[in-house]
Amino acid sequence: MSRTHIHKYQTRYHAQATYSKAIRAKGDFVFMQGQVGTLLDGTLIGEGDPGAQADQACKNIKRWMEEAGGSLQDVCKLTVYVTDMSYRGPVYEAINQWFEGVNHCSTGVVVQGLADPSLLVEIDAMAIIDTE
């Protein structure tokens, strides 16, 4: 894919990874709704476990990227919402396992709550799939 990473850097919070401050990319955009730790039928994976919920959310992102004709390598931006600051460590450890080497941009936000009180994390993803 035609992608330029602008200012790659090492995170200094919790789980270590390399991210990019910005990415310039060419191709087809993929926007998806925030992904949470549930299966398609709504079954929650990881009740009370933010890392397990993040892992399932990443599995969901992978599935939707593949159905869109791409892969996790095409993801340019994640926005990660957690309901408690202490969840950042296990959440980013799960994310980093799925997105190792992608060097996407990432924003983390602590929120008061999500759509369901049992949800501890939600992850928005944006991607660009190269069409050439």
Image (tube, grey):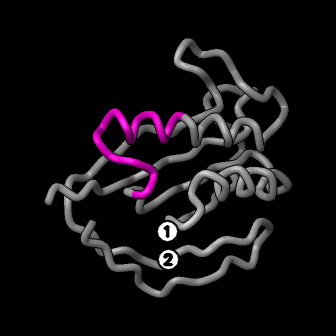
Q: Is residue 96 left or right of residue 71?
A: right
Place residue 77 in its image quadrant.
bottom left
Determine the residue located farthest toward the left in the rendered image.
Answer: 132
> Which residue is under mark 2?
20
Determine the residue located farthest toward the bottom in the rendered image.
Answer: 7
**Distance from the alpha carbon under mark 2 to that under mark 1:** 5 Å
Q: Quadrant of the C terminus?
A: bottom left
Q: Residue at x 80, y 67 (%)?
A: 14
Front in this rendered view, residue 61 or 125: 61
Compared to residue 129, the image places residue 13 above or below, namely below
Where disc 1 sits, the SS reads strand
Place residue 48 in its image quadrant.
top right
> Which residue is under mark 1?
105
Q: Is residue 80 left or right of residue 30?
A: right
Amino acid residing under circle 2: Ser
Q: Of marks 2 and 1, which one's residue comes earlier in the chain?
A: 2
